Image (cartoon, helix red, strand yellow):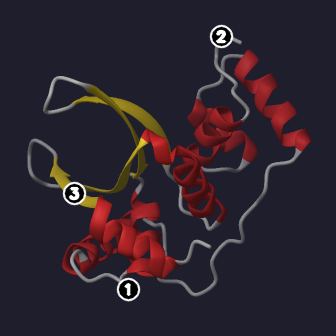
Amino acid sequence: MITWAYIAGFLDGDGWITVSQNKNATTQRWTIGFTQSYKKHEFMQTLFEFLMNNGINCDIKERIVMGSIHKETRMINIMIRTQEAVFLLSKKLIPFLVMKKTLAIHAMTYTKNRMKKRGFGLTNKKQKKRIYWKESDDNKLKNLINNGFSNLAIANELNRSIDSVGHRLYRIKLTRNS
């Protein structure tokens, strides 16, 4: 069973928290990620679904790395990139983290302040409740894609976030060419 404490231990051991800055060093982009051998892809898929079901928007991707003996190794990564998701995950994991606690506190503090400036208002106690996708939403989504709408335009039309639209397109395997 996956718990926040388990995820914190996984992050301390096989995960990372990174920060990058834009050219002018005025903004930072925090990322939280997990890596495992592809042999553990079922576990990583379960972790991915746990995070998504708990409001943490993330990506899961396979990659190939060159090993020390010139052998290719398949790996699987889960990456949390949006400011809101980094904030939410950091907040959940900080009580359980040991090795990466300081980094998580910096990530949470920065993303919280940045979102406040941009009007996300995550300090408000009354948060929006998660809106689940329905078949009628999927039909509207397909129609908007077929009419050439961008993800931003679709998000505005369906009253969803851009991340939610992008993730839903991925989940239902819908591309702009299909």
User: In which quadrant of the rendered image does the C terminus lie?
Assistant: top right
- Looking at the rendered image, the disc whose residue lies closer to the viewer, 1 or 2, is 1
- Give the answer, above or below, for where 11 lies relative to 123: above
Residue 54: which disc?
Answer: none
Q: Quadrant of residue 171?
A: top right
Q: Are marks 1 and 2 in contact (CB under 8 Å)?
A: no
Residue 144 located left or right of residue 124 = right
Disc 1 to disc 2, C-alpha distance: 44 Å
Residue that numbered label 1 is attached to:
96
Q: Earlier in the sequence, mark 3 or mark 2?
A: 3
- Give the answer, above or below, for where 53 lies relative to 60: below
Residue 18: which disc?
Answer: 3
Residue 38 located left or right of residue 100 = right
Residue at image location 47% in from the left, 83% down from the top: 123
Residue 107: percent from left, percent from top: 27, 70
Q: Are marks 3 and 2 in contact (CB under 8 Å)?
A: no
Disc 3 to disc 2, C-alpha distance: 34 Å
Tell me, yes or no, if residue 47 can be seen here. yes
- Looking at the rendered image, the disc whose residue lies closer to the viewer, 3 or 2, is 3
Q: Are marks 3 and 1 in contact (CB under 8 Å)?
A: no
Residue 119: percent from left, percent from top: 45, 66
Residue at image location 35% in from the left, 55% down from the top: 33
Residue 11 located left or right of residue 61 = left
Residue at image location 39% in from the left, 52% down from the top: 81
Tell me, yes or no, if residue 116 can be seen here. no
Q: Secondary structure at mark 2?
A: loop
- Give the answer, above or below, for where 158 lies relative to 90: above
Front-lying residue, 44 or 134: 44
Disc 3 to disc 1, C-alpha distance: 19 Å
Q: Secondary structure at mark 3?
A: strand
Amino acid carrying mark 2 in the image: Asn
Q: Earlier in the sequence, mark 1 or mark 2?
A: 1
